[in-house]
Amino acid sequence: MSELSYRESILVACPPDELYDLVSDVTRMGEWSPICAACWWDDGGGPRPGAWFTGRNQTPERTWETRSQVVVADPGREFAFEVNHGFVRWGYTFTPASGGTELTESWNFLPKGIAGFHDRYGDDAEAQIAERTSAAHTGIPVTLAAIKKTAESR
């Protein structure tokens, strides 16, 4: 797997359908992610293909918002969205496993995003891409552990 894509899995003692309902409620992402502080559905949306939501991200250096569109909403199986019209794809798969569900979170920095970062940041694009890549690689295990804790304490 290239550094511009990453995935990690965790076993969660929760049925796939229940875990999907939890994870696909993007308004809860701020509880789990080390960077995403909050998300909200735009225009009364919800976890269905084509729905849009806004996310507010925070690091010690800055705060910014992104818009994302749900690209897959298959209850109990997969939930995925793309940030900024196809810059980055985040996804979650829910695989039945002994004792619950294997939850996999994936992140892919897409070609449109690489080009967009070069357009936006110029000579600093590679450093910006490296920063986002590092954040995904370190943030995914933290997010998965927090989702597991929430799901198993219900």
Image (tube, rainbow, N blue to C red):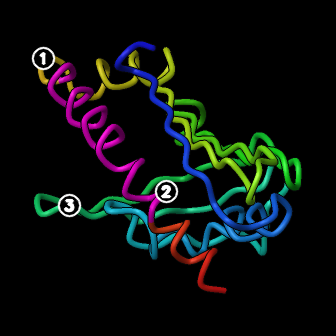
As helix, strand or loop, the secondary structure at mark 1 comes to helix
Task: Identify the residue at image location x=45%, y=14%.
Answer: 1
Q: Position of residue 122 (x, y in %)?
A: 19, 19
Which residue has dot 2 on it? 144
Which residue has dot 3 on it? 59
Sequence-first tag of 3 and 1: 3
Residues 29 and 122: in front is 29
Give the crowd class for mark 1: few <14, some 14-19, many >=20 residues within 10 Å: few
Residue 103 sits above or below residue 27 on the image: above
Q: Quadrant of residue 40?
A: bottom right
- In the rendered image, residue 133 lying in the magenta stretch gets the answer yes
Q: Amino acid at mark 3?
A: Thr
Report the mark closest to the observer, 3 or 2: 2
Which stretch appears magenta? 125-145
Residue 53 sits above or below residue 110 on the image: below
Residues 1 and 88: in front is 1
Q: Position of residue 68 (x, y in %)?
A: 60, 50
Q: Amino acid at mark 1?
A: Asp
Task: Identify the residue at image location x=27%, y=27%.
Answer: 129
Which residue has dot 1 on it? 123
